[in-house]
Image (cartoon, grey):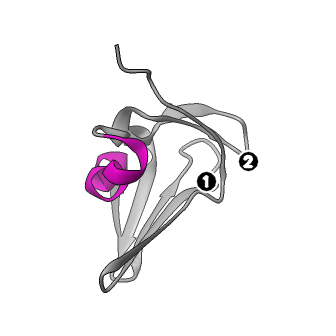
């Protein structure tokens, strides 16, 4: 298992959260903290990636590539705050 930051999920989350998903702010369902995807602790394995809250370790995002399909879940994310383009 490799530990990286949320920037590692940029490519996988682009279609879901926009052109720069690393600036998207998530509210943790576990502790209520706010933080951009870029600051999440991301654990990568051959099975996929899991982004956890740095404050309480709640699973915020999971990404699994299965052949030509990508499964994305936000199990521990209470809300997503995205900047509105000008």
- Residue occupying image coordinates x 71% and y 35%: 32
Q: Could you tell me residue 15's position as x and y percent?
A: 34, 52
Q: Which residues are magenta?
A: 6-18
| Quarter occupied by residue 27 | top right
Q: Secondary structure at mark 1?
A: loop
Majority SS type along the magenta span: helix
- Residue occupying image coordinates x 60% and y 41%: 55
Question: Label 2: which residue?
Answer: 30
Is 8 within the magenta? yes
Report the residue that reaches farthest toward the bottom. Answer: 67
Q: Relative to residue 25, is residue 3 depicted above or below?
A: below
Q: Relative to residue 58, is residue 32 depicted above or below?
A: above
- Of circles 1 and 2, the one toward us is 2
Residue 17 versus residue 61: which sits nearer the camera? 17
Q: Could you tell me residue 11's position as x and y percent?
A: 26, 55
**Residues at discs 1 and 2 in contact (Cβ within 8 Å):** yes
Say few, some or many: other residues with alpha carbon within 10 Å of mark 2 (under 14 / 14 to 19 / 20 or more): some
- Residue occupying image coordinates x 52% and y 33%: 35
Q: Relative to residue 34, is residue 3 depicted above or below?
A: below
Residue 57 is marked as: 1
Report whether 8 appears left or right of 47.
left
Is 65 within the magenta? no
Residue 58 versus residue 16: which sits nearer the camera? 16
Q: Could you tell me residue 56's position as x and y percent?
A: 65, 47
Total labels: the figure holds: 2
Say few, some or many: other residues with alpha carbon within 10 Å of mark 1 (under 14 / 14 to 19 / 20 or more): some
Q: Is residue 1 visible?
A: no
- The mark nearer the N terminus, 1 or 2, is 2
């Amino acid at each position: 298992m490799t530990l990286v930051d949320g920037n590692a999920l940029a490519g996988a989350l682009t279609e879901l959260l926009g052109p720069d998903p690393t600036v998207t702010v998530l509210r943790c369902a576990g502790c209520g903290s706010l933080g951009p995807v870029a600051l999440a602790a991301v654990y990568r394995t051959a099975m996929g990636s899991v982004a956890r809250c740095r404050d309480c370790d709640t699973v915020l995002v999971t990404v699994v590539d299965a052949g030509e399909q990508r499964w994305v879940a936000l199990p521990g994310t209470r809300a997503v705050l995205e900047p509105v383009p000008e």
